[in-house]
Image: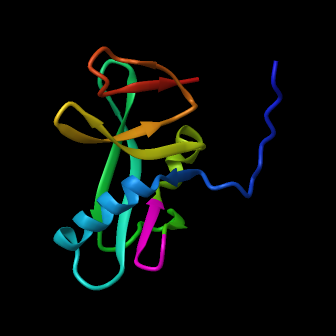
């Protein structure tokens, strides 16, 4: 048995180096200027409850939690999704010939068969 401790100062979401490089390659195609934003939220969807929504945006929405990934790229986290996403790692994985953004979310208790939606407690 292990004991986990809630750390209110811990980042809600982290991004691996591979995912960060992927976001940088794609940010220039989606937004102008030197500073880029990625927004992460969830929506009710599919047979399991929630689906991730990851978009390049020009600016965060009011109330978003801001996570600076580096000096040019920031992640805006939907304030209503923080509890569902807390502890999530965003990674870039290779599946066959494709590269896919993968969400390693410790809060997920179930997924639909196709992997498009997930459920939490």
Can you say which quadrant of the picture contains the C terminus? top right
Number of callouts: 0
Counting from the top left corner in percent of width and height, residue 92 is at 35, 46
Q: Is residue 86 left or right of residue 26?
A: right
Q: Quadrant of residue 99?
A: top left
- Asked if residue 30 is among those painted magenta in the image, a careful observer would answer no
Q: Nearer the viewer, residue 93 or 114?
A: 93
Measuring 57% from the left and 30% from the top, which residue is drawn there? Answer: 107
**Relative to residue 67, is residue 90 drawn left or right?**
left
| Residue 74 colored in magenta in the image | yes
The residue lying at 29 percent from left, 28 percent from top is 116
The residue range painted magenta reads 70-76
Q: Nearer the viewer, residue 32 or 61?
A: 32
Give left or right: position of 107 versus 115.
right
Rendered position, 93 above or below 56: above
Does 18 sit above or below residue 42? below
In depth, the one of 93 and 32 nearer the eye is 93
Which residue lies at the image location 54% right of the left edge and 51% below the top edge? 13
x, y percent for residue 35: 36, 80
The residue that appears at 36% across and 69% down in the rendered structure is 37
Q: Residue furthest bottom?
A: 33
The quarter of the rendered structure image containing the N terminus is: top right
Percent across and percent down for residue 49 are 40, 25
Estimate the x, y position of residue 48 in percent, counting from the top left.
Answer: 38, 20
């Amino acid at each position: 048995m292990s004991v986990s401790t809630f750390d209110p100062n811990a980042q809600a979401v982290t991004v691996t180096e591979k995912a960060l490089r992927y976001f940088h390659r794609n940010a220039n195609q989606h937004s102008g200027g030197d500073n880029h934003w990625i927004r992460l939220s969830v929506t009710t969807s599919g047979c399991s409850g929630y689906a991730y929504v990851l978009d390049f945006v020009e600016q965060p929405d009011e109330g978003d939690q801001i996570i600076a990934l580096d000096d040019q790229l920031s992640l805006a986290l939907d304030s209503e999704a923080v509890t569902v996403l807390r502890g999530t790692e965003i990674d870039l994985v290779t599946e066959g010939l494709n590269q896919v953004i993968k969400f390693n979310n410790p809060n997920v208790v179930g997924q639909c068969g196709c992997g498009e939606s997930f459920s939490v407690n």
